[in-house]
Amino acid sequence: MTRTEWHRFRTVRAILRQDERFLMVVHHGGFGLRRERWGLPGGRIEYGEDFVETARRELREELSIHVATLQAVGDYRYKGALHRIFGSDFDGRILEFDRSEIRRIGWHSLDEVSKLAQQGLLHAGFEDVAIRDFLKLGG
């Protein structure tokens, strides 16, 4: 990743699909938010790290999992920065997650994710669009 890309992109996120349900997480927020906001797992890009390395590291750190393949879905804007999204099918189990970073995890249908979007309960607001884009790519 170039220095310019590193400054333009804030995070890498992953869409994980299992049996037509998608993993959503509630990250801890220190800003006194009263409502939980659901988002995709992932996190900040470390300097010198490429997008795929970031996705794999974040999934390992947050969820203690490894995914075999990651398909690039696209770049989405949130709070003035770009966020690279990947997608993957996941047939394993999540036995533990980093409770210092994540409050809750849950598997949601696309309809449930859309309802969360309508209620303003998505973290970045692009999660349902990104999942639909993943599905359009054959994901």
Image (spheres, rainbow, N blue to C red):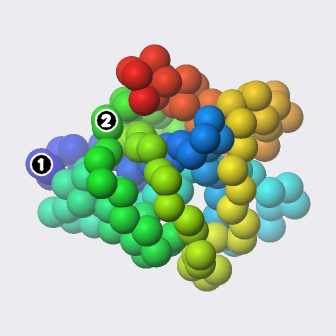
Give the left or right position of residue 119, taking residue 25 as reference.
right
Residue 86 in percent (x, y) is at 38, 41
Residue 96 in percent (x, y) is at 59, 78
- Residue at 47% across, 33% down: 77
Q: Would you place residue 98 above or below residue 124 in this image?
A: below
Element at badge 2? strand
Query: Considering depth in this image, is 84 or 5 the residue closer to the camera?
Result: 84
Q: Which residue is mark 2?
A: 72
- Residue at 80% across, 57% down: 36
Residue 14's disc number:
none
Give the left or right position of residue 48, taking residue 63 as reference.
left
How many C-alpha atoms fall within 10 Å of the one at disc 1: few (<14), some, or many (≥20)?
Answer: few
Q: Which residue is mark 1?
A: 2
- Amino acid on which disc 1 is placed: Thr
Earlier residue among tags 2 and 1: 1
- Residue at 39% across, 50% down: 12
Q: Would you place residue 131 above or below residue 138 in this image?
A: below
- Amino acid on which disc 2 is placed: Ala
Q: Nearer the viewer, mark 2 or mark 1?
A: 2
